[in-house]
Image (tube, rainbow, N blue to C red):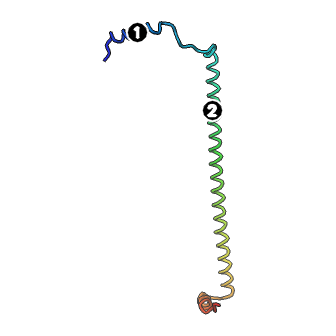
Amino acid sequence: MRTDNNIEELEAKLLERFGTENHFTVPEGYFDKLPGRVASRIAQRKRRRLAWKWAAAAILVGCVFTGGMLFERQEAAKTANAEEVQYIEDALNYSMIDNMSIASYLTEADYN
């Protein structure tokens, strides 16, 4: 564990080796231009975030639209199938053919 004396000795060695002058430099006008650069980066991020939101919204709308179209097609197919079945039932009722006659006709059919 370091004591206060050790810390003072280390500080003295550092002062002796590097002195008190500042060895770090910043380019001329760096801090004058810094707020403008930060503001432009923030604006770029906001534009990117807005683009992502629009893209996500477009994908969502596309999925909902596609789902709606598939549902509509499925319902149309069910309706068409129901209409065909109803047409066949009406034709059978009109011709007065009962289920027993149909069954006997299908079982007595000659298969070649």
Cα gap from disc 1 to disc 2, whole angstroms? 49 Å
Q: Provide the secondary structure element on which disc 2 rests.
A: helix
Q: x and y percent of residue 25 in the render?
A: 57, 13
Residue 73: name its quadrant. Answer: bottom right
The residue at the point 64 percent across, 65 percent down is 75
Q: Is residue 46 above or below residue 83?
A: above
In the rendered view, tell whether residue 112 sits above or below residue 1. Answer: below
Q: Residue at x 64, y 88 (%)?
A: 97
Crowd rating for badge 2 (residues with CA inside 10 Å; few <14, some 14–19, many 20+): few
Label ID, residue 46? 2
Quadrant of the drawing holding the C terminus: bottom right
Q: Quadrant of residue 12?
A: top left
Q: In front here: 84 or 12?
A: 12
Amino acid type of the residue tagged 2 in the rendering: Lys
Residue at (68% x, 78% y) in the render: 87
Mark 1: give few (<14), some (14-19) or many (20+) Cα within 10 Å.
few
What amino acid is found at the position of numbered circle 1 in the picture?
Answer: Lys
Q: Quadrant of the N terminus?
A: top left
Above or below 16: residue 50: below
- Mark 1 vs mark 2: give the one in front: 1
Q: Earlier in the sequence, mark 1 or mark 2?
A: 1
Residue at image position (47%, 7%) is: 19
Give the secondary structure at mark 1: helix
Q: Which residue is mark 1?
A: 13
34 or 52: which is nearer to us? 34
